[in-house]
Amino acid sequence: MLRLLALDVILLGAVVFELVKPTFTPHSFSVLRHWIFAGLLAYFLITLASMLLAINPRESFFDIAKTFAIFLLTAYSAIVFIQTPDWHNKLPKFVIVSALISCTIGFYQYYDRVMMNTIKFLENGEPTIYLVKGLMAHKNIFAISLMLMLPFTGYGIYKYRKGWRLASILASVLIIVIIIMLQTRSVWVGFFISAGVFTVMLTVLGKKFNVQPKVRLILLTAMVAGFLAISSLMLFGNKNTENPYLRRLLSITSTDVFDSGFRLKIWAISTKMIADKPITGIGAGNWKIKSVEYYKDFDFTKDQLNWIRPHNDFLWVFTEKGIFGFLLFLGLFGLTIFYMFSIFLSSAKTEYKIFTLFMMAGLASYLTDSLFSFPLERIEIQVYLSMIMASTVAIYHLNCQQKPLKINQNLAFTPVVIILLLSVAYSFSALSLEFKVRKARNAHSRSDWQGMLAEAKTMSTFFRNMDAESMPVEWYSGLAYASLNDLENAKIHYLKAHQANPTKIAILNNLGQIYFKQENFDEAKVWFLKALAILPDYFESNVNLSSTYIKLGDYENALKTLNTIPKNKRDERIQKIMVSVEKKLQQKEE
């Protein structure tokens, strides 16, 4: 949210400046005639329209705001590039500086949090390398952002001399070292694929890049040797090795690894969601709500409820925006690749072709990661993708004869300013919500129910009614009221939370508990059954449902429910209840 807010403010400032003191000419707007901008605009409009189909329309706002910001950034950047002399040699310098700063932070965190740490694993079982995340929220996001810096630093090695070349080499080496240390498998695969694409294109179209045949042969030999070496490791390597890097590499093709196996389940769920609504989709931002309805078909457990994305951007777009959104999404990449090949085969300057080749390698790494992760959600990663697209279309444009495009800037930029202002208001509101949620959780950890309630009452806004983990903000008020034994107010807020996210199992269970305490056992049973319809082995709801059946005198269903609880989870209290229920049934039979 902070990055979205920053991007919106920067774009808003740029557009307002252009309105006050216009610098764009009809010729500079001519770059907008290319189909990629029509595709970006159409994709934004489909994202906007999909909100009408969403279970919770407010959850669409982030996708809408982000999509518009990236569309505008790409268009604005392309216009600026074609007006700026030697822009393609200036742009990488910003990335090189950014890379050196990011790598410095990353190495410091590795030294401080891994090397100097007295423990090897965190409380959740993850290795301490997960503490190395730069300025990102997670080490994997850090790794992806570093990977997308490589095309720019690589071009710096090719183009610059003296100090900037040394800086480019240093940045590239540091990036590769940190990527290896972070052990993010999708980034490793993305790096290998991008290197392969770069080498193949340089070999096959070597004449277009003025590469000598001997150099092309060396590159091709190195690529084949590298491919054979990695393939041999994957096929014949010892999966029980103690080397963490080799073990991580060998796990890429293994479905036995927890997150790999679970990712396959999530993809299967997404495929079913697409089959159910292939035309319209379910609405932007609503995958995390709708997907839960499919859990019962894929043997999920409570420990697997924290994934709120399908970890595949293509499936994500298809499920939420339907076939037309999906085709537009693919079309954006297809057009970019078409522009790249057109540049390679044109009479453009060699350095333009080399720059485009590095951008193609970056696009290949992005698309590879998109198959296993969710770079579509991350603002900083989308900014790099925007730079790749804007750079490509700007170079392509230089080799096209385009008519000037006259635009009434006041008429065109006014709606842009309005949308950006709404986006700023949204991102600021959502960022404020995250701080309030943190305060409410801190109060919860201290059992400060009045403090938690005070924070919870200020949470819900027009723009957002769920936190970053898809928990409706009304749940915080409901929990605080329930803990203060104000059952009626707790029920009111839990019902509002249920309306915001009808598939959140914790809320279904909480509502059942409220009705149970109010001795409305028939209604309590309904809510516990709703929770178990989503996740049949949900421990809390099984225990609560069995207690409800006992209150209703339905001992047979009470025992049946208790028997669904795994034996290793049956503590002394549950065992006593089971003995008691069995005696009741025996007495009933007698």
Image: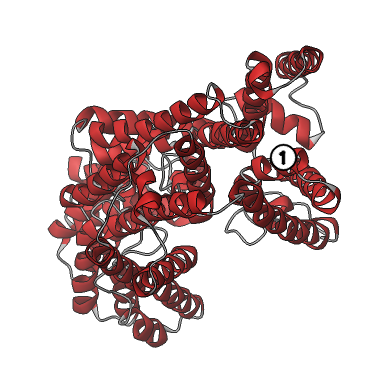
Residue 64 in picture, x, y percent from top left: 30, 55
User: Pointer 1: what residue?
Assistant: 154
Q: Residue at x 16, y 55 (%)?
A: 552
Q: Residue at x 19, y 40 (%)?
A: 589
SS class, disc 1:
helix
Nearest to the observer: residue 327 or residue 416: 416
Nearest to the observer: residue 358 or residue 542: 358
Q: Viewed as shown, does residue 386 lie left or right of 402?
A: right
Kind of residue at badge 1: Gly
Nearest to the observer: residue 283 or residue 235: 283
Residue 236 in picture, x, y percent from top left: 75, 14
Q: Is residue 479 above or below residue 229?
A: below
Nearest to the observer: residue 457 or residue 297: 457
- Where residue 348 sits, quadrant-wise, is top right
Q: Is residue 572 above or below residue 42?
A: below
Q: Viewed as shown, does residue 163 lie left or right of 233?
A: right
Work out which quarter of the rendered image holds the N terminus and state it: bottom left
Work out which quarter of the rendered image holds the C terminus and state it: top left
Mark 1 residue crowding within 10 angstroms, few (<14) / some (14–19) / many (20+): many
Q: Is residue 15 above or below residue 436?
A: above
Residue 449 in picture, x, y percent from top left: 39, 83
Residue 298 in picture, x, y percent from top left: 37, 31
Q: Viewed as shown, does residue 116 lie left or right of 8?
A: right
Answer whether residue 99 is visible to the viewer in this image.
yes
